Amino acid sequence: MFKVPSQGTSLSAIGEPVPPIYLPISDCYEYVPLPGPNDWLNQYQEEGQTFNDFVNGEFEAPDETRKKIYLVPIGSFNKDHAPNIDILVKYVKVFFDTDRVELLPAIEIQENPSPSNKLEIDNTTKSNDVVDATVCSLNDTNRTNCSGKTKVGKGSSNKKNARDLLHSHRKPKSSSKITTNDDEDIMEIDPSTSSTPELPIPKASTIVSVNILNEFINNNSEGEDATSLISKKHNGTNNKERKDKKKKRKKKEYIYLKLGEKLEPVTCRKALDFDELQLCISDILDILECTVPSDAFCLIGLTLWDLYMDASDLFIVGLSSSGFSGCFSFARYDPVPYKETNFHEILHLFGISHCIYFSCLMNGTASLYEDDMAPFYLCPVCERKLQYVLKFDVLQRYKNMLNFFTNDLSEFNFKEETTWVTKKLAYLNSLTEEEIELSYKEVVIPSSSSSSHNHYGSSQEKCKSRCDQRILRSTKK
């Protein structure tokens, strides 16, 4: 059961002392609420990532070589529920405060191409380690209308491709031991220790169920020996299992992504909850990884096709990899001009983990309902991480965001977002130049919280005192 961090712990996660521009004012931020039994934080163990953890850990930042965020549509977006790609690109620029965002030509999908044009992919050239996914499993208790951002694992020194890594996470094949029921006790029969030596005993290497042995003893008067009875029992079971498996075994089906003159295969299947095709996201990541431009910080595929990752998945909304590629599906969402969940996947590529301190865009979600309830903005902890990497002007970023919501999205209902940004800007405009300067001042980040301390001059101590007062006010509900 998840234990909600105290307010003091959440404030400490921002960094001590809390810079004025990152104060969690009550008009704009809420501490993470107590999760329900089927919510993300009660299904998956999250340790949390403080600002200090982020700086001391492995984070990724664009540089002069890898500097662009590329977006590429996969398949057609000429549908009623498709987002406006141009608006989406513009908001990515606003959200990450950069002009280094580029839209690539769409990758065409062909469902039934000419066999002569098909080209298999060489998986040995790929190294996708799965970092994060938005996934719904059939095993989830809240599996109706379900999704979730599931951290599968970060890249290791011994890199594998995405398909290999996904296979390693699947359940092992059923045991070769013979039993008619998983709950039955299993025992090995040894003639030298058997308490019924007068009965015909099977070979010691045979593993049998206690229930089967009891059945043999009770029916031995009929003249059947144990070996024939067990053989009959198991052969019947195995034959039935083989027939069932044969029925379930289906030939893999593919659709193809057209890259230039080549067609790259992507495994597909019929969705488990409705009559539409789903694409295997790990196959898509394999392909995207081979097409990442040399100047890309990341390449994000966008599609209206429904996705899945493993056989038990009802669907998967998005997935990012340590190879700096990701994919996001709009298939499960109502028509919107953009969806901030794809920013969640990009933020993971910067090394930002799920947030457990405040209501935040980086909260993990285990259902579409929980995903819809997540805010569109970053909490102070996660916003400070992003600013530390990108070095943007916080005040100007929110001004650009307000302009985007009021002008570019004027025909849509984004009143809630506009109101929130307006409140945030009002607070930022109330800060003095001294407080803003203090917020941007580089401080030495301690390697552990136990050694955490910073030295400030008199003017900085004065600002810190004002910060403390604001913290007290912001915690009063």
Image: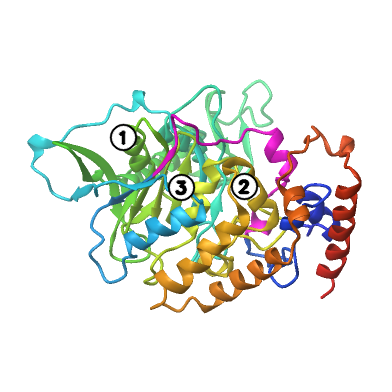
Q: CA distance from mark 1 to mark 3?
A: 17 Å
Tell me, yes or no, whether the highlighted magenta stretch contains residue 56. yes
Magenta span contains residue 114: no
- Sequence order check: which comes first, mark 1 or mark 3? 1
Q: Give the amino acid type for the residue marked by disc 1 in the picture.
A: Thr
Q: Position of residue 363 (x, y in %)?
A: 62, 57
Q: Give the alpha-carbon distance from disc 3 to disc 2, as whole Å.
A: 23 Å
Instruction: Of the two numbered discs 3 and 2 on the same chain, state the one appearing first in sequence.
Output: 3
- The residue drawn where x is 57% and y is 38% is 153
Which disc is residue 291 wearing?
1
Residue 78 image point, x, y percent = 22, 64
In the image, residue 122 sits, relative to residue 472, either above or below, namely above
Q: The magenta stretch spans which residues?
A: 40-69
Label annotation for residue 319? 3
Kindly identify the residue that appears in the image at 73 percent across and 54 percent down.
Answer: 436
What residue would you read off at disc 2? 387
Q: Secondary structure at mark 1?
A: loop
